Amino acid sequence: MPATLSFLGAAGEVTGSCFLIDTGAIRFLIDCGMFQGGREAEHKNRASFGFDARDIAFVLLSHAHIDHSGLLPRLCAQGFKGPVYATGATVDLCEVMLPDSAFIQEREAQQHALERRRARGKASYERAPLYTVAQAQACLKLMRRVEYDVEIEPHPGIRARLRHAGHILGSAIVEVRLPGKAGHRLVFSGDLGQPGHPIVQDAAEVREADTLLVESTYGNRCHKSMAETLDELTAAIKTTLEHKRGNVIIPAFAVGRTQDIVFLLAELWRSGRLPALDIYVDSPMALAATTVTMRHAQLFDEQARATLRWLSEDHPGFRVHFVQEVEDSIALNARREGAIIISASGMCDAGRIKHHLRHNLPRPECAVIIVGFQAAGSLGRRLVDRASAVRIFGEPVPVRSDIYTIGGLSAHADQAALLGWLQAFRRGPKQVYLVHGEIAAAEALRREIAERLGWQPRIARKDDGIRLA
Ligand SMILES: [Zn+2]
């Protein structure tokens, strides 16, 4: 019986990355990500996996982002006992992120109960968190560190290798060689970064695959050049801080994006383009994630190493404060001007960013700078789509601040970069599936690949199975 692969998530959408491979003898997963953005995502996260977690032999994890790793604690809670293979940096980041994700789940469950009680004025039903901090901790014990580019054998006859993906610290392309004479080669691009992305090295070139799964987040878009992007960022910050005298709010994943932004701001400030900066990184896990990042400086590119050295010195005029305590975060609400607040979550659906948005969105002198992808249904997406008011904690909040969307800072490769990465293949893979993209983006990339490379890629559909033969 030939091996099969089922698309359990990140098919026709960008979140919930999870692929089930069944070799006939064993089953394993690539990624076990959480769905994010809106109510529907919540249902999907709580739905049955569609397989028995106890049957999964191992997991290959592409990177630490929650939409790739976020359901691992749930998998473990349901009886998965096998190892989870990931790069050392990914394991370190997961040690920060998964308990934090669980903490947010626990707190949102409490918040939810509180809102229901308020709305109904009577006892409400309690909703259990998706998973608990204790379950996340238990799951971390299953993680195994793998070096980049070193082949491992997670199960007799199955070989796997993680390659640089250029997306966030520790991010990887996953290569798998299945058992059998032909040794079917399965390659999952993971999330690919734009070449020249801050901090990390560029994605490795892959030359061969029988089956290729490639991300398509920005399959229909070309980012502005880095130079233009930095001009936009500089202008937005100067306008807000110097001329309008407000605050700048930057929603950002605490892991990856936040460090990218701090490094970029440091580089812009060093080149004399920005006024004195008072930067507040307000996410309980951002400090931990930044510490992890600094520990892996050997994975940095050249420029990032220089910036790291500069950051380790004292510079009046460029101050970065890591906000840990809740009281200090609340104190920021009273700040009327002059602050750059970088806070999570990146799509504005959870965490402290919601408080900062509630206080700053109604003020025309303030600005929100969107620097990452905003999934359909998320609060961040409604801001990008220019909603005149949004709901935060169940209450309407008018949007009077400036909203800047700076696409060029995305952690994802654009159409040109995706095509560039695909061009490195020696010949067209037998089958190519586009994953991790909304339909319009995947469709645009499909057409472009067919036209430029002469391949016939298909768009992955959720719960569909394909043969790996
Ligand atoms: Zn990612």
Image: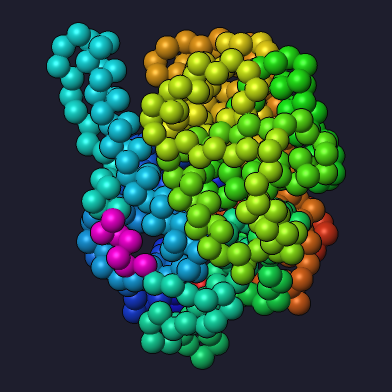
Instruction: From the viewer's perspective, tell me whether residue 68 is left or right of residue 429.
Output: left
**What range is drawn magenta here?**
137-143
Q: Position of residue 230 (x, y in %)?
A: 79, 40
Quarter where residue 309 is shown? bottom right
Quarter where residue 40 is shown? top left
Residue 272 is covered by the magenta coloring = no
Identify the colour scheme used: rainbow
Residue at 18 percent of width and 24 percent of height: 125
Q: Position of residue 226 (x, y in %)?
A: 81, 46
Q: Nearer the viewer, residue 112 or 263?
A: 263
Check the image and report above or below for 50 versus 334: below
> Count the marks: how many?
0
Residue at 44 percent of width and 61 percent of height: 92
Check the image and report above or below for 292 versus 258: below
Residue 30 shows in the view:
no
Residue at 43 percent of width and 63 percent of height: 91
Residue at 50 percent of width and 55 percent of height: 291
